[in-house]
Structures are given as structure tokens and as C-alpha cells.
Amino acid sequence: MHCFVGRRVSLPRLHISLSRNAPEVVGLIDALTRSRIVSYSAVRSGSEGAGGQLDSFSSSPVISCVSPTVRPFPRLGPGGIIHTVELYTIGYEGISQEALFETLLQNGVQVLIDIRELPLSRRPGFSKSKLAGAALSYGLKYDHIRALGTPRDIRYRRKIDHDYEAFKQGFLAHLAEQDKAMEALVARALTERCCLLCYEGVAEECHRWFVAERAKGMSAGRLTVVHLSAG
């Protein structure tokens, strides 16, 4: 399923029988609507039975993107409860501090987690102390997890040889040894809406891609990764 910013995608009309599992159907629609994944209009049809309830209704759901990035459809557990939580990532390459925090707020992020090994930047507003202060002013929390950053030798080797595959293998070997930091990240991401921060604008070119994917795997399917862009 795909959706795009600024477009509303109408899906085929659905005919749902309420004669069975009515509470589950209503609960599912309510959960999707409250989570801002689906808006819908309903047209009742059919005849009333002996209990005075309609046999069925039809609805035309409309998928609405409220994020610059596609929101994956959630997995549902017993009773229609949504069990997945979004773990966001973002890079600040080419954007302002204001644009960064506006994007985080638009997506309901609560905690900005800096995963640069050295949280320093020549870009105004993107060093650790400046980010922490700005996060507070926007009503967000800021945390820095150095262990999940790219080690200095791997970073500098990539600058010299531009070998992405060597960079990938080197960082994955490092990440495999960071169980404690990863466990802490997963635990926090399951209780607060978190966003991983690094520099590169394209997630696939950044080590945060691998951190997010490992967190997703460690969460037993409870985390869904969403890569944001403020550009």
C-alpha cells in the first residue's frame, strides 16, 4: 500500500457484515481513525433485524498521509489492538535546526536520540548542547548514545576509500558488540516515540539505517522503522 504527501487515495468500497464480530470491526475502525492512518465515511445499508440492529454497512476508507514518509499499516493483535510503534530516523544534512524540530513535532516525536559518536558539528545549532537546549524549548527530550555511533577509524576510512561495502561490514561488526546500548534503545522506543539522529540526509547512506533495522529485529516485530526527511 502506498500513499503520497498531499494526496488522498480512495480505496474500493468495502462491505462489512456486522452480524458477526461487530465489536471487533468497530474497534478496528476506531483504532485506525484515532491513529490517523485511516479516515472513512460510512453508509448504512441492509435491514434491521429482530434486535433492531442493521445487518451491514459499507464504507469508503480514505488513506491520509500525515507524515512526509509513508506510514506502514500496523499489525494487529487480539481484540484489534495495534502493537507496533514507529521508530523514526532523520538526518540534518542541508536543513535548519528549525526545520528539523518542525518535522519531529509533525510526527509526534517525543525523544530525539543522537547516535553520532561525537555529537559535534560545524553547522550552527547541531552540536550536543545546542540540540539539547533546542529540544527542551520544543518540549522534546534529547539523549546521546555514543556506543551506537560510527567509530572514528571506520568513518575516516570511508572518507579516504569511499568503499560503502567496507563501511557497512565494519559498522555491522561494531554494532554486533553493542547489545546493551541496543537493548536500552529498543526498550525506550517501545515506550516513547523516538527518532534517531545523524548527519546524512539519505538514510540508506547512513549508519542509522543499520541501527534502526537491528532495533526492529530485536523488537520481535513491535517496531516499524520510518525514515523522515525535512527537505
Image (cartoon, rainbow, N blue to C red):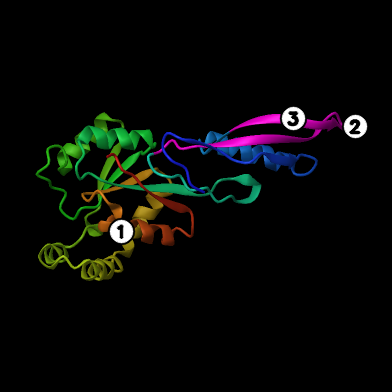
Residue 73, image x, y percentages: 52, 47
**Extreme right residue here?**
50
Which amino acid is tagged 2? Ala
| SS for callout 3 | strand
Find the distance from the CA under tag 2 to the CA under tag 1: 59 Å
Mark 3 and mark 2 lie on one chain; the one further toward the N terminus is 3
Q: Residues within 10 Å of mark 3 (few under 14, many from 20)?
A: few
In percent of the image, x 11 and y 63: which residue is there? 156
The residue singled out by tag 1 in the image is 181
Q: Are marks 1 and 3 in contact (CB under 8 Å)?
A: no
The residue singled out by tag 3 in the image is 44
Q: Residues within 10 Å of mark 2 (few under 14, many from 20)?
A: few
The residue singled out by tag 2 in the image is 50
Residue 166, image x, y percentages: 21, 71
Q: Is residue 77 magenta?
A: no
Between label 1 and label 3, give the one nearer the viewer: 3
Front residue of 160/127: it is: 160
Residue 144, image x, y percentages: 23, 49
Residue 15, image quadrant = top right
Find the distance from the CA under tag 3 to the CA under tag 2: 17 Å
Which span of residues is magenta-colored? 40-67
Which amino acid is tagged 3? Arg
Q: Is residue 58 magenta?
A: yes
Side of 217 relative to 123 (left or right): right
Between label 3 and label 2, give the one nearer the viewer: 3
Residue 19, image quadrant = top right
